Image (cartoon, rainbow, N blue to C red):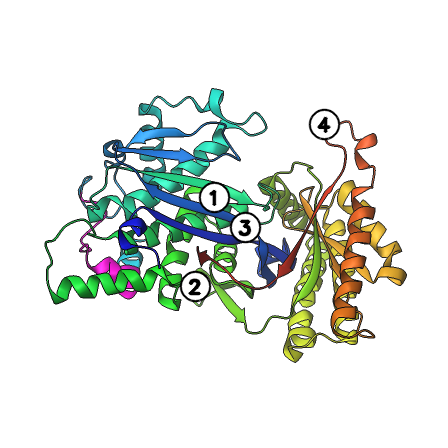
């Protein structure tokens, strides 16, 4: 067992991306969507204490070298809770953070951060003389890196600064573990969830660890709590609620008004049905249903590397709907019915059979064609869909775009071969996955695609279990 003084210096967490199986775009117009976590595609965050009074932000996927900000420069901004600028985020006592229900109540009382918080954090970054335009990865904009720093600084202010941890600073390293960034697979939410979980665990582990102001039974109880967290890989339900709330608040700093579907799936894992509702007062609300025992689905994710703008695509569907409501409304209704059918005919049985596998394939194909009718697909995505349709008789495959469309990613579902048993079925599936990946990655979309970066030579495929563990402490 690792010694306690070693534990005082490190905390890590990882959180999965997400896949929208059915319902993208229709969910904006009050239809249900089905989303599941991508267990094997994750963002990992590691927090390590240091002694020089600085916070080092190490994001190798975005920037070549770590950048640093003095921790005292992070202490002043108005977080919108009505407190003084240096009050550390409200009236919660340092000991109450160990109790997740108290901490969750505090977070809900102060509410999501306001636009003033974004403004204040940007000023902190500017005053730190960080030139993001010269330091960031050439493939990404300085705004992308700033969008990552803003929620991290917010989380530091909520989790680290108020509780007077006796350290001189820390390193935060954020790195993708096979999860493509900006490809519609929930990398932003996975980043927020993993960051929230790692920093939250850091506080739980190291809270008041380096002083002797609580001798006797009180101190022993506190250490018992720390050790309990140390050996705990899966956060408790109450701790997950705290992490999810922190992650959602972080997402509002990046996206303004996120639905909450991405961070919820990344936090709790498994799969969910999400639908926006209008209550009796005319206010927008939402309903989230978690699925128990979500069945294992064999899926290949394909990154087309085609850039797209979610906002532009969503606005395009809205305009199409406004101009031709009698045409677009039935399309959106049909997409919603696909989600409902998946829940009723597939998930209700809790076991995938030959018949339900064929239904999933047909629903995937139909959903893709309906999204094409809305104008949110792309030739690269259609190329993948057409290929797997041609391969269906031999390999039992079907594909659709996932997320906003217009590029980004597609996913391909492979039906199980129920004629085989045990290891034979598993080996056959691995063989079929390899064939599908080879055929997709050999597609020559970029040969005549002048608008795409010429360095791209092929699509890139990933495999992942769909539905499974959400955020984990490492």
Is residue 99 part of the magenta span, yes or no? yes
- Residue 42's label in the rendered image is 3
Residue identified by numbered label 2: 234
Magenta span contains residue 42: no
Sequence-wise first label, 4 or 1: 1
Q: Which numbered disc covers residue 455?
A: 4
Mark before the other along the chain sequence, 3 or 2:
3
Label 3, label 1: how far apart the Cα atoms are: 20 Å
Question: What distance separates the C-alpha of mark 4 from that of mark 1?
Answer: 30 Å
Q: Is residue 187 above or below residue 70?
A: below
SS category of the residue bearing label 1: helix
Q: Secondary structure at mark 4?
A: loop
Q: Mark 1 — residue?
A: 255
Q: CA distance from mark 1 to mark 2?
A: 28 Å
Which residue: 46% across, 27% down? 65
Q: Is residue 367 left or right of residue 19?
A: right
Dot 2: within a 10 Å radius of its alpha carbon, few (fewer than 14), some, or many (20 or more) residues?
some
Residue 186: horizontal and vertical position, in percent? 55, 49
Q: Earlier in the sequence, mark 1 or mark 2?
A: 2
Q: Which residues are magenta?
A: 87-105
């Amino acid at each position: 067992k690792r010694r306690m003084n070693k534990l005082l210096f490190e905390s890590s967490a990882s959180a999965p991306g997400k896949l929208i199986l059915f319902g993208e775009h229709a969910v904006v117009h009050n239809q249900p969507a089905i989303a599941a976590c991508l267990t094997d595609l994750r963002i990992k965050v590691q927090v390590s204490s240091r002694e020089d009074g600085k916070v080092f932000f190490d994001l190798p996927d975005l920037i070549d070298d770590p950048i640093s900000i003095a921790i005292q420069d992070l202490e002043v901004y108005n977080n919108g809770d009505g407190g003084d600028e240096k009050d550390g985020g409200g009236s919660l006592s340092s000991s109450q953070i160990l109790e997740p229900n108290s901490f969750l109540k505090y977070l809900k009382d102060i509410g999501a951060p306001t636009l003033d918080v974004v403004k204040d954090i940007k000023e902190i970054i500017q005053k730190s003389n960080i030139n993001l335009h010269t330091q960031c990865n050439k493939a990404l904009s300085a705004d992308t890196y700033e969008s990552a720093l803003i929620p991290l600084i917010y989380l530091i202010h909520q989790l680290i600064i108020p509780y007077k941890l006796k350290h001189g600073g820390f390193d935060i390293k954020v790195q993708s573990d096979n999860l493509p960034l900006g490809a519609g697979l929930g990398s932003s939410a996975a980043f927020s969830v993993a960051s929230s979980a790692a920093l939250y665990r850091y506080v739980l582990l190291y809270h008041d660890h380096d002083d002797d102001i609580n001798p006797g039974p009180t101190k022993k109880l506190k250490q018992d709590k720390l050790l309990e967290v140390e050996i705990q890989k899966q956060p408790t339900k109450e701790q997950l609620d705290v992490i999810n709330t922190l992650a959602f608040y972080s997402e509002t700093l990046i996206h303004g008004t996120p639905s909450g579907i991405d961070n919820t799936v990344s936090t709790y894992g498994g799969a969910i049905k999400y639908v926006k509702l209008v209550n009796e007062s005319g206010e927008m609300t939402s309903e989230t249903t978690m699925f128990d025992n979500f069945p294992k689905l064999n899926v290949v994710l394909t990154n087309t590397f085609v850039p797209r703008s979610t906002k532009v695509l969503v606005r395009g569907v809205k305009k199409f709907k406004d101009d031709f409501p009698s045409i677009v409304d039935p399309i959106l209704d049909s997409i919603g019915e696909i989600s409902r059918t998946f829940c009723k005919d597939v998930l209700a049985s809790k076991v995938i059979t030959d018949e339900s596998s064929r239904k999933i394939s047909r629903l995937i194909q139909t959903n893709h064609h309906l999204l094409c009718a809305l104008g949110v697909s792309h030739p690269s995505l259609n190329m993948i869909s057409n290929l797997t349709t041609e391969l269906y008789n031999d390999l039992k495959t079907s594909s659709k775009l996932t997320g906003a469309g217009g590029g980004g990613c597609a996913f391909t579902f492979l039906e199980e071969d129920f004629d085989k048993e045990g290891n034979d079925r598993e080996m056959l599936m691995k063989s079929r996955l390899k064939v599908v990946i080879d055929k997709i990655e050999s597609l020559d979309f970029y040969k005549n695609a002048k608008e795409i970066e010429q360095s791209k030579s092929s699509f890139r495929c990933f495999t992942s279990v769909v539905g499974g563990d959400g955020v984990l402490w490492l």
